Image (cartoon, coloured by chain):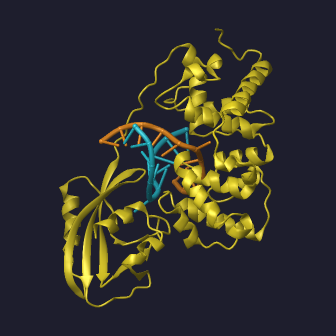
Chain colours: A yellow, B cyan, C orange
Amino acid sequence: MKYIKFNNFTKEKKLWVNRIIYWYDKNKRNLMWRKPENQNFYSVWISEIMLQQTNVQTVEKYFLAFKKKWPTFDSFLNANLNDILKIWQGLGYYQRAKNIYKTLQILKKKKIKVTYNELIKLPGIGDYSAAAISAILEDQNHAVVDGNIKRILSRVFNIDSQSKKFTTQVYKKAKELTPNSGNGDYCQALMDIGATICKPKQVNCNICPLKKFCDFFITKKKILRKKLVAKKKKVGVTFVYEFENEIYVEKSEEAFLHGLMKFQTSDFLEYRSNYEYTKKKKLLDMKNNFVSKNSNLGFVEHHFTNFHLVLFIKKIEIYKKFYDPKGLWIFKKDFFNYPFSNLMIKVFKKI
DNA sequence: AAGCCGGGGAT
DNA sequence: ATCCCAGGCTT
C-alpha cells in the first residue's frame, strides 16, 4: 500500500476530506443531538456544553432529561438556575450550568448570530465550542480541535504530544485541512473516528479510513504511556446539622461546587503529613450550640479534577434550630429535590 | 503557552 | 487506582 503524502496539497486535502465525509456517511454514531429536529442552536448549544470534558455516553441521559424538561428554546427562556442545576446534578463541572444560565439571560436581551465570532463571546463557549457550533449549524469553517482531533492529527502527522509546540502545530494542521464547506460533518466525523477507531489506548487501524495518510500506521508505531502526575490529596470536614427529620444545607456561593447545595463544609487543607489530619480532627471535636449529640461518621472520598479529597463527616444533632441567611433547613426526605453533587450525595448516604 | 479548574464514568 | 473525556478560563 502506498502512503499518501501531502505533496500536491490541494489534491491530497480533497482526498483527505472526501474519505472522511464518506466514512461519516456510512459509519456515524447515532446520537440524539444529531437528529434533524435537533439541528437548531438551542439543542446543539446545550449538547456541546454538556459534552465538554464529558463522555458521549454520560451526556445522552442528561441531554434527554434536559430536552424533556425544556423541549424548545422558548420553553427554556424562563428557566431558573436552580432548575438547571437540578438537571445538571451528577454531570460535574457545575460552572457549565451557571454559564448556560448566564448565556440565557444574554440571549433574552439580544439576538445573536450563530457565528464563531459571536459565540465565543458567550460565557462557557470557548474556541472548540464556537468552532463546532458554527460549523454544524452555519457551515462555518473555523478549525475544530478537541481531544479526539488532537490525538488523530498527532498520530497521522507525527506531531510529538510532549513537545511545547504541540498545540500550535496541531492547530496549524487542523486549519490547513479544514474544508471550506461541510465542516460540520467533517469535524464530527473526526471525533467519531477518534472515539471509535483511533482511541487513546487502543487503535483499530485496519478499519481506519485515514490509514493511508497515517504516519502512526505506516511506521507501525506503538502507543506510548503518558507520564502520570500524582494527584494532590486534601482533607476537609463537613458538618451535618440535624433537627428531628430536618437537615441544614447551604448553597455554595464560592468556587466549590458552583451553585449547588452542600452541607456546611470547612475549607480543604492540602495533605502533606498527619499534621493536617490532626488539625481537621480537632474541628471534629468542636463545640457547638444547642447540641444534644455529636457523632463522627468517618469520611468519604472523592476525586476532583486536580485533587483527591478525604472529607470527614460530623453529624450534629441539635435540640433547637438555628437560622443563618446562608442556609436553610430541609426535610431529609426532600434531599433529592435539591441539586447536590455526588460528593454530597455520598455524605448523605452515610448519615 | 501553561496551569488550573474543586467531576465523573469506565476499567 | 488509573485514565481521559466533543474544554474554558486565567495568568
Relative side of A100 to A319, left or right? right
Image position, residue A350 (x, y; %):
28, 66
Vertically, is A28 above or below A55? above
Vertically, is A201 above or below A244? above
Residue at the spot 61% in from the left edge and 23% down from the top edge: A208
Can you name the residue that lies furthest to the bottom here?
A320
Q: How many marks?
A: 0
Relative side of A105 to A146, left or right? right
Q: Quadrant of the N terminus of chain A?
A: top right
Vertically, is A139 above or below A43? above
Task: Please name whichever residue, A250 or A75, is drawn nearer the observer in this view of the structure.
Answer: A75
Tell me if residue A166 can be seen: no
Tell me if residue A345 can be seen: yes
Image position, residue A128 (x, y; %):
64, 45
Relative side of A176 to A153, left or right? right
Residue at the spot 69% in from the left edge and 14% down from the top edge: A5
The quadrant holding residue A125 is bottom right
Vertically, is A97 above or below A120? below
Can you name the residue that lies furthest to the top here?
A1
The quadrant holding residue A282 is bottom left
Image position, residue A141 (x, y; %):
77, 39
The quadrant holding residue A290 is bottom left
